[in-house]
Image (spheres, rainbow, N blue to C red):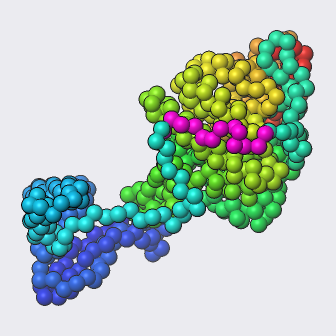
């Protein structure tokens, strides 16, 4: 039962005006606890003579809002003629108010222009006096229309999070950061060792070993994403076979905060993981969540914002309506609103590194900008240069406080090969410990593979590399021959939560029979389909180890159909284990020069 109670406005001449505000209240007195009563609560404001005085103060925006309210209230209402008459009155007032606000806007613009012209005049002659008279006349008109004595352009408040160093935008926006001679020479780290175990004679594929303070990583390696210091629906104990876990600085800054995690002893202690961790700078989430694009929590966070700010939400708070919003991007860095409470968070190259130092990951990434795929080359070139300057500052901050952490640079340039080459040339001249390939890699997989086929040979072979955000089985099969060492993606766990499981393809095996053959030719098993209701086989009979011992396809099908949370956990565990076995098989084939 949903009951909307709207109290009409009540104005008593000579008494205190009654101004309405909307509140949403949960009713516990009705038969269903989900009943919602919307009550326009009467609040007290100053003394007025009539309703008309209150109406005259309404802006065009408020009038449009009132018009929408009337249109919504008139649906299903029998008072059609009365509503129509009221709407016509508001439309007439809206037209007058819009004309008035347009005049005010023109006056404000003219005042600003004439003040600038006045400031530019050095002499005290007639021209200056004439300008002053014109400004005074405009201010008089402004006062008569608004009630304010003079128009003063509001200045932006200086941020309370100003950097100690004032980084100004260079005259040449295409300028890179400082040159290599301003940094110390790169030397192998005793806490971060990289060695090539075997290079295939058939392709650029290679098996390598990366030694970190928290363990060894054998590559090629799949890196699952643990957005909030946890792979979705999977515990650290269930992920102990994962060689390298990816955590997102952005989300951990929003909650619980880097200080809390540092107090817990760093990410490894906080999430009870005793194996290598890599963290990003937070930049990817800032830009991608602003556009609601690919991120483990992208769509889910978008839905959270909708639930918190939607018209039918149980808790509506206009102050947080733009949570998650990207606010500024400049030479300093970027600022955005927390998607939890709307507070403004500043992210700069230095603050990103400082946060990652507190998180304590084995591999960290410098701050970079992520422009969308469809931008002009000029805009893309400026973005690459800005990322280079940010990464140089990040590197300088990192080298002052290494803390047994390695830092990977991020190669940018979109699908522009010249910009990608330039990015490789500049970043490889600096003392980074490895290189990640980021930014837009193309509109589809075909364009991505063509770009990486060009790009990977440009990277140095004596340092590890990483491809950001791409790591499904099909992509891994194509990336490994190009020489990719590690790759992360939230795709395997995300699709698992929607009932899509990775399995061996039928073409991978000989001597199959009807009883044991996988039910997929493309390596995908959609467990929600009805054909699995009585399929009691393991999820993938051809893997060397059963990913979910004792659990059948029929059982997993049942869990998904009944919306049991356990379904999400088991499916995620399976896809993670499948990717681990899949990458181990690729390493074996490289060692045998089969890839």
| Rendering coords of residue 212 (x, y %) | 86, 44
- The answer to which quarter of the image holds residue 453 is top right
- The percent position of residue 586, horizontal first and vertical second, equals 82, 23
- Vertical placement of residue 554 versus 256, above or below: above
In the rendered image, residue 97, in percent from the top left (x then y), is placed at: 13, 60
- Write down the region rendered in magenta: 173-185
Identify the main secondary structure in magenta: loop
* Closer to us: 439 or 538: 439
Number of numbered discs: 0
| 67 magenta-colored | no
Q: Is residue 484 visible?
A: yes
Residue at (86% x, 42% y) in the render: 189
Camera sees residue 239 = no
Q: Residue 19: x, y in percent?
A: 25, 77
Residue 428 is left or right of residue 291, and the answer is right
- Residue 220 vs 399, above or below: the answer is above
Residue 95, quarter of picture: bottom left
Task: State the residue at coordinates (13%, 75%).
Answer: 53
Residue under the point 11% across and 83% down: 49
């Amino acid at each position: 039962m949903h009951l909307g109670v709207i109290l009409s406005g009540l104005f008593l001449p000579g008494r205190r005006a009654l101004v309405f505000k909307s509140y949403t209240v949960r009713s516990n007195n009705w038969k269903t606890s989900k009943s919602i009563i919307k009550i326009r609560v009467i609040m007290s404001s100053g003394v007025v003579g009539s309703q008309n005085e209150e109406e005259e103060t309404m802006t065009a925006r408020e009038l449009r809002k009132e018009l929408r309210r009337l249109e919504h209230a008139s649906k299903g209402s029998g008072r059609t003629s009365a509503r129509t008459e009221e709407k016509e009155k508001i439309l007439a007032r809206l037209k007058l108010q819009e004309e008035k606000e347009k005049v005010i806007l023109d006056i404000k613009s003219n005042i600003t222009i004439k003040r600038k012209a006045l400031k530019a005049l050095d002499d005290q002659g007639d021209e200056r006096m004439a300008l002053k008279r014109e400004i005074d006349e405009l201010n008089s008109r402004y006062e008569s229309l608004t009630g304010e004595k003079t128009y003063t352009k509001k200045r932006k408040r200086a941020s309370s999070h100003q950097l100690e160093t004032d980084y100004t935008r260079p005259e040449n926006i295409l300028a890179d950061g400082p040159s290599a001679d301003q940094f110390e020479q790169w030397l192998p780290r005793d806490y971060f060792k990289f060695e090539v175990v075997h290079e295939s004679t058939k392709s650029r594929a290679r098996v390598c070993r990366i030694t970190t303070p928290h363990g060894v990583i054998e590559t090629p390696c799949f890196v699952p994403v643990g957005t909030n210091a946890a792979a979705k629906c999977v515990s650290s104990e269930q992920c102990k076979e994962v060689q390298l876990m990816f955590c997102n600085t952005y989300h951990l800054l929003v909650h619980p905060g880097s200080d809390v995690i540092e107090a817990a002893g760093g990410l490894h202690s906080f999430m009870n993981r005793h194996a290598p961790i890599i963290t990003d700078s937070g930049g990817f989430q800032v830009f991608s969540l602003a556009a609601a694009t690919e991120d483990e929590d992208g769509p889910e966070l978008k839905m959270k914002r909708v639930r918190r700010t939607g018209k039918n939400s149980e808790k509506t708070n206009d102050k947080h309506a733009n949570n998650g919003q990207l606010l500024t991007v400049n030479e300093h860095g970027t600022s955005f609103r927390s998607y939890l409470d709307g507070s403004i968070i500043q992210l700069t190259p230095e603050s990103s590194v400082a946060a990652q130092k507190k998180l304590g990951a084995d591999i960290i990434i410098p701050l970079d900008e992520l422009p969308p795929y469809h931008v002009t080359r000029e805009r893309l070139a400026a973005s690459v240069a800005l990322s280079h300057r940010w990464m140089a500052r990040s590197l300088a901050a990192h080298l002052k406080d290494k803390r047994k952490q390695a830092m990977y640079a991020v190669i940018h340039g979109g699908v522009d090969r010249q910009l990608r080459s330039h990015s490789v040339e500049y970043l490889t001249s600096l003392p980074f410990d490895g290189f990640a390939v980021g930014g837009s890699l193309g509109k589809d997989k075909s364009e991505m593979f063509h770009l990486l086929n060009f790009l990977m040979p440009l990277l140095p072979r004596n340092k590890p590399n990483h491809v950001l955000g791409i790591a499904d089985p099909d992509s891994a099969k194509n990336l490994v021959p190009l020489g990719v060492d590690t790759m992360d993606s939230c795709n395997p766990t995300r699709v698992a939560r929607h009932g899509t499981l990775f399995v061996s393809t039928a073409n991978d095996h000989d001597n199959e029979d009807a009883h044991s053959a996988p039910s997929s030719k493309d390596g995908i098993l959609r467990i929600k389909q009805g054909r699995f209701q009585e399929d009691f086989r393991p999820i993938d009979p051809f893997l060397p180890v059963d990913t979910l011992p004792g659990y059948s396809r029929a059982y997993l099908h049942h869990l998904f159909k009944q919306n049991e949370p356990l379904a999400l956990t088991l499916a995620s565990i399976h896809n993670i284990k499948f990717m681990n076995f899949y990458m181990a098989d690729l390493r074996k084939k490289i060692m045998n020069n089969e890839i």
